[in-house]
Image (tube, rainbow, N blue to C red):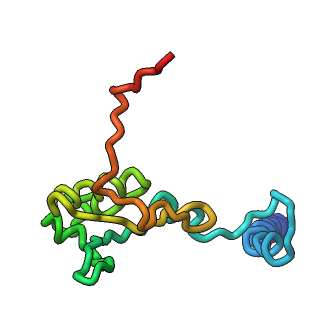
Amino acid sequence: METLTDFRGSMFRMCFLLLVGGWMVLGPAYRQVFDGKSEWFPRWVMFHGFGRNVCDVRFYRFDEAADGSTVQTPLDRFEVLDKRRDWATNKSLVRMSSKADVEKVGSRLCRALGPGADVRALARCGSRDHWKGKLNFSIELCKKQKFNRRIRPRILR
């Protein structure tokens, strides 16, 4: 009698394991291969949300050539600011996560290059679905006025 109980217990465990394992393995196939809409089955997502709030930024210096044309020169922000490519000490230079962060680094580059510099950035930031363009070459970062929240404009009546 004891062997029959052991057999039933092991059969129950095996059936339970097959049921749960099948749900884990075949559930994502139901949602993604067969376009199933049920929330009871998990969907297979790799790196969900990874890459959001990370910007791909390239800085350029614009100079006028002798013939009047504009010349773009790529800038290495670490060389211009004389900083190491180190995450621990230069987080603001290594990872920019918004348009405001890109503009802050651009203003630092402008100060380092001196007056009359024309620094522009090409920046795109990751979102849930695709890259979103944040800055193109139309905005001169050295001429951008800082916005001070403490000073409020006077409202004329």
Is 52 on the left or on the right of 100, as rendered?
A: right
User: Across the whole image, how many numbered discs are drawn on residues?
Assistant: 0
**What percent of the width, then of the height, locates residue 68?**
29, 78
Q: Is residue 104 above or below residue 18?
A: above
Residue pictured at 39% horizontal, 25% vertical: 152
Q: Quadrant of residue 153?
A: top left
Task: Report whether residue 10 is seen.
Answer: no
Is 11 on the left or on the right of 53, as rendered?
A: right
Is 37 on the left or on the right of 114, as rendered?
A: right
**What percent of the width, then of the height, locates residue 8?**
84, 67
Which of these two is toward me, 49 or 115?
Answer: 115
Which of these two is toward me, 157 or 10?
Answer: 157
Residue pictured at 35% horizontal, 54% vertical: 103
Q: Quadrant of residue 112?
A: bottom left
Q: Quadrant of residue 154?
A: top left
Q: Residue furthest top?
A: 157
Residue pictured at 52% horizontal, 64% vertical: 133
Which of these two is toward me, 128 or 144?
Answer: 144
Task: Report whether residue 112 is seen.
Answer: yes
Residue pictured at 15% horizontal, 59% vertical: 114
**What percent of the width, then of the height, locates residue 4?**
85, 68
Of the 4 image quadrants, the one containing the N terminus is bottom right
Q: Residue furthest bottom?
A: 67
Q: Is residue 113 above or below residue 65?
A: above
Which of these two is toward me, 46 or 124?
Answer: 124
**What percent of the width, then of the height, locates residue 128?**
60, 61
